[in-house]
Image (spheres, rainbow, N blue to C red):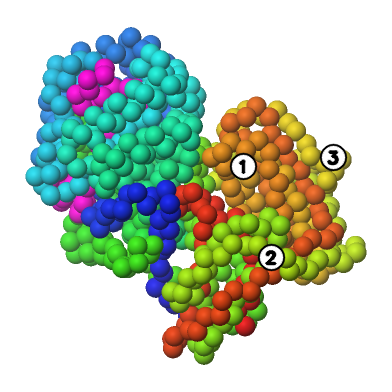
Amino acid sequence: MRLKATLILCLCTLLLSAQQKPSQQWLDQKFSMFIHFGLYSAYGGVYEGKPVTRGYSEQIQSFAGIFSDWYARTTKEFNPVQWNPGSIVSLAKEAGMQSIVFTSKHHDGFCMYHSDYTDFNIVDATPYGRDLMKELAEACKKGGIGFGVYCSLIDWHYPQAFPISSHNADPLTPEHYAYNLKQVEEIMTRYGDISEIWFDMGSLTPEQSKGLYELVNRLQPQCMVSGRLGNDFVDFAVMTDNEYPDYQLGVPWQTAASMFDETWGYRSWQDRGSVEEKVNEKIASLIRVVGTGGHYLLNIGPRGDGSVVEFERDVLRGIGAWLKVNPLNLSSSWKDDPEKASYLPAEVSQSVVGSGALSPQNATPLFGHSSLNYYAGYKSIIGYEWVLPAGTRKVTPEITFTDSETGRRIVLEIDGHKQPVTLQSASFKTERLPSNSVIWSKVFRKPGRGVFGNVEEEGAASVDLNTMGSEWELVDNFQEGVIYTEDIQPRESVIFLHEIVSSRQQTASVEITCGNGVYILLNGEYLTAHLSPARIKEQKELLLLPLKKGLNQLIIKYYNGFDETFSYGVNPLSAWKIYSQKLTPVTLDKKEEHAVWLRSGDAISPVSPLRLNNVKIQTE
């Protein structure tokens, strides 16, 4: 059965003050130009006559180890006289793009606009002497396309900021945060309408993220704020660099793509290959993103003199030529219900639940992309959707849940009939695991890699622990029911694999203790993930495990977002409570199928994890 996919925008209390977001104009900007252009462009990825092969070229100051005063001298030679904002806008339009997002300031702290708060800017420090960003903003307005800005939240030049580090996720000192506020206010008040502000990097406190979010909202209520602001203060989710999600997102989202994975800023020695092959690659990516409801932001990196690399120009023209012959539906229809938007190109296959309870296992999950900071980004379940068969005329929903969900506020919607519910019930039964029916067997561990949301075993029904080069190590004497504490650096993680042998298909229960964040898979299937902006040091939750007969693999990634230690533990339960709560009966319209939605009623953000993976709904 095929149904047109409806993507929930889930605008929560946090965003109600911004009634104009997301505007139809922003929703329709499905294909846009990203421009990484700054002082780093003058280097072209080369320092002292040698290519700098490590890291992105826009971060050459860090990766080449250039002293700050030496780097600052580059301003005396930075004179992008070949830059032509009108030509840039024309190129974007020729490529079929609807907006441009420009780097107002990257990590090096050099401002490509005229800032009053530092002379390390293109007007005061260079022979060019003009406000390059202002001229581009005006050209975008004249050309009838949107204008957005990238703004780095870290700054290697500001004297009271944290110095260069290996990870770019540094905190903001109070002085640096105040400096950022002032510069964001400049951008929001001097450059016309800003369609989006693309914050990047840094590890802000929740209060700092909130302050910047509210500043943008106050000065430009329609300006969309990227998820990389952190702490789930977000108008649109941003994937990790060059990430193409294979799951359905229920919030506005964007994939930012570089022309080459190796760099965003100009690299003179880049092996560029065939224009035709690159055109085909980027068209495929465009279709993949836009076809599933996302926004595609494709980058170019001009040379230090301001000229566009001919290869990148030709690729954009090739995409534009293809779009003229094969026009994609790049617009989105905005329904009367402000909580829903239907993205016309997206269709997914959904199974009708003919009988039995509605559960996370037979639902179509809707995901957000939660992010405390860049390294702590992950896909977060924000809702479940089911389809009931034709012929169902009246339902009396009954919801079951565990102690972990007690007190939660939810919204259950059946064919548009919404029921806000607080999960609070005195009615329960005790479930017991049959004796000796489940054996917790061997335990393995390995270091986690990459960002929090990266678990390479996801989707693999079975992990081969004996593969050559496997990092999995057997953990001797692991004790279930014991809480362990380890020293660990911030942004690091460890992954455990628990082998569970079940004598039958059944549900088991386990209490999991974790520190900042946890990402859990059962037999390769995503169960839950969460990483709290509240900086919780230790938390426990009850998790129901739908075990198959035979060997099961429970994979738990424990992540340390901010502390020097973290706690973890697994405690299998022999008995647990299942609460039940009857809801108001619903009479359904005459339809071929009926849609059922479950989402949070107490989320602080549209990307906050749902954490209702133990809930089931009876509709018979």
- Which residue lies at the image location 63% right of the left edge and 74% below the top edge? 582
- Residue 186 higher or lower than 382, as above or below: above
Q: CA distance from mark 1 to mark 2?
A: 29 Å
- Residue type beneath disc 3: Asp
The quarter of the picture where the C terminus appears is bottom right
> Is 460 in front, or is 590?
590
- Residue type beneath disc 2: Ser
- Which residue lies at the image location 42% right of the left edge and 48% below the top edge? 14
Q: Is residue 95 left or right of residue 265?
A: left
First-in-chain label (1 vs 3): 3
The stretch of residues the image draws in magenta is 89-118
Res 428 → quadrant: bottom right
Q: Which residue corresponds to mark 3?
A: 476
Callout 1 crowding tier (Cα within 10 Å): few <14, some 14–19, many ≥20: many
Q: CA distance from mark 1 to mark 3?
A: 24 Å
Q: Which mark is residue 425?
A: 2
Q: Residue furthest top?
A: 69
- Residue 117 higher or lower than 543, as above or below: above
Check if residue 110 falls in the magenta segment.
yes
Q: Which residue corresponds to mark 1?
A: 517
> Is 491 in front, or is 381?
381
Q: Is residue 596 left or right of residue 186?
A: right
SS at circle 1: strand
- Which residue lies at the image location 34% right of the left edge and 49% below the top edge? 17
- Residue type beneath disc 1: Gly
